[in-house]
């Protein structure tokens, strides 16, 4: 793992061509999108091209975990005692209820056993862990991602002017924005993305932690994270991937000096607002996966990336014209393409397969890791939506998609009590939107990546 001093710190060198990917990395589509972005960017870049992956930290819970069986049982209890259909039951689980909200009036708990009543309490939102624990979680996820990049992008390197072999991939962790993020997910429903990079001993430590309660459980969880971080850090010492905390002022200087900056956003718009307030918006060509024209298909009261920091989203949308270029991909377009699993797995192998099993198919993370390599391939005949990957393709391969350009504005941007919803506009001065209709056949991403990597 290279130190940043080899690159002159985060200030870099003059006239860099920057591709900045701002993401939070919890889900399978995040990992697939970044790998595809690297495949497209690195082989064709000169020595002054750099890909910066800026990982947005968000609140997490180190101790909370539901097995897939427990989750399914809870959804069943919500449906039967609350009279909710499958999707509405999932909304209740993901959003949860505040601790001071008497949600029991909405549920018929009388027929429930004591175990089922206790399970139903998981819709009561606990507080997230302290920010120091959130930093541990993000650090481990970033290290896991660095391993993934080192494994699957190991051939995408270049020789610098001094003849030295260098990687032009850097992973920077944005801890500073953490206090401004508001994770809308019920901590009890937290997706344990940290489990997919663990070895057998670490999985055992995690399982032992889940048998404990109170302070011993908290201590065991932190110990599990610290041991995992130590192993990953040691494992990556000889890799060429740079990983370090984001220093905002250094990033700003780097953007100022850059020849060009392409920005792909798949998380909150917090950092994008900071860059605008620094007076650097005109340097950025932006594509962000955010917003919706219809909240009925969303799981949260706001589109998720907006919900993470509503004020930042409203600010950026209001100042979109200040950016060098600015595009949004809303929820309906992000869900318009499905991807062939065999094609995806040609890119990301078993590592990506595990994450797809966990996130897209709801399989239990510990079970996946325990049965690694023997889980079965029945799901490979299916196709999955990958919203961040679709958003990325709109940015880097728009000619391969049947895209229509529309314009949208936020119809209630000034009302803090209402969700930020897009509406179509006839004005070319409003935000540009990538509009996609649902594709009838799965998209084969692997053939496109082969073209990029081979230069054909």
Image: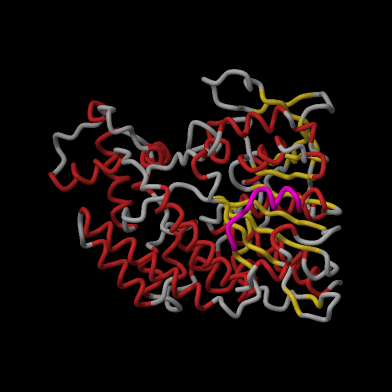
* Residue 377, percent from left and from top: 49, 72
Q: Residue at x 58, y 73 (%)?
A: 349
Q: Which image quarter holds the N terminus?
A: bottom right
The answer to whether residue 90 shows anywhere in this view is: yes
Foreground of the two, 375 or 51? 51
Give the number of marks.
0
Does the magenta portion include 437?
no
Name the quadrant of the C terminus: bottom right
Q: Is residue 439 visible?
A: no
Task: Measuring from the top left, give residue 335's x and y in whole percent.
Answer: 62, 46
- The residue segment tinted magenta is 244-253
* Dominant secondary-structure state across the stretch colored magenta: helix
For residue 304, side relative to residue 74 (left or right):
right
Which residue is depicted at the point 43% across and 76% down? 372
The quarter of the picture where residue 209 lies is: bottom left
Looking at the image, is 371 positioned above or below residue 263?
A: below
Of residue 267 and residue 245, the one placed in the foreground of this image is 245
Residue 197 at x, y percent in the picture: 47, 70
Q: Nearer the viewer, residue 347 or 188?
A: 188
Indicate how the structure is coloured in the image. Answer: secondary structure
Q: Residue at the spot x=80%, y=38% of the render?
A: 405
Left-right relation of 281 to 370? right
| On screen, residue 66 above or below 111 | below
Residue 282 locus on image (x, y percent): 82, 39
């Amino acid at each position: 793992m290279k130190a940043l001093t080899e690159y002159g710190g985060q200030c870099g060198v003059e006239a860099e061509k920057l591709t900045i990917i701002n993401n939070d990395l919890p889900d399978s589509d995040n990992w697939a999108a970044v790998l595809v972005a690297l495949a497209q960017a690195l082989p064709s870049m000169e020595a002054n091209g750099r890909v910066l992956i800026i990982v947005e930290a968000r609140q997490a819970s180190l101790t909370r975990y539901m097995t897939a069986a427990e989750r399914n049982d809870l959804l069943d209890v919500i449906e039967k005692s609350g009279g909710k259909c499958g999707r509405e039951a999932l909304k209740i689980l993901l959003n949860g209820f505040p601790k001071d909200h008497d949600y029991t009036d909405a549920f018929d708990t009388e027929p429930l056993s004591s175990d089922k009543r206790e399970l139903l309490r998981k819709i009561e939102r606990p507080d997230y862990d302290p920010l120091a624990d959130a930093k541990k979680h993000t650090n481990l996820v970033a290290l896991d991602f660095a391993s993934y990049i080192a494994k699957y992008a190991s051939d995408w390197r270049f020789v610098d002017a001094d003849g030295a072999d260098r990687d032009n991939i850097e992973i920077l962790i944005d801890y500073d924005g953490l206090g401004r993020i508001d994770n809308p997910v019920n901590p009890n429903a937290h997706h344990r993305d940290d489990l997919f990079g663990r070895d057998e001993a670490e999985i055992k430590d995690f399982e032992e932690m889940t048998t404990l309660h109170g302070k011993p459980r908290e201590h065991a969880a932190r110990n599990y994270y610290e041991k995992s971080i130590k192993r990953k850090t040691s494992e990556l010492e000889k890799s060429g991937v740079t990983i370090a905390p984001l220093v905002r002022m250094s990033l700003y200087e780097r953007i100022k000096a850059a020849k060009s900056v392409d920005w792909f956003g798949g998380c909150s718009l917090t950092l994008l607002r900071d860059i605008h307030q620094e007076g650097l918006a005109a340097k950025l060509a932006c594509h962000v996966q955010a917003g919706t024209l219809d909240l009925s298909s969303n799981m949260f009261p706001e589109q998720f990336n907006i919900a993470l920091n509503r004020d930042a989203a409203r600010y950026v949308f209001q100042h979109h014209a200040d950016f060098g270029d600015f595009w949004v991909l809303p929820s309906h377009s992000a869900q318009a393409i499905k991807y062939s699993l065999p094609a995806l797995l040609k890119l990301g192998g078993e590592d990506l397969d595990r994450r797809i099993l966990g996130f897209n198919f709801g399989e239990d993370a510990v079970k996946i890791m325990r049965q690694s390599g023997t889980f079965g391939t029945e799901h490979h005949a299916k196709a999955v939506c990958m919203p961040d990957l679709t958003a990325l393709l709109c940015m880097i391969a728009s000619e391969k998609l049947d895209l229509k350009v529309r314009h949208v504005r936020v119809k209630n941007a000034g009302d803090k009590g209402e969700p930020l919803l897009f509406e179509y506009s006839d004005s070319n001065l409003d935000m540009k939107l990538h509009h996609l209709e649902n594709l009838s056949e799965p998209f084969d991403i692997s053939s496109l990546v082969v073209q990029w990597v081979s230069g054909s």
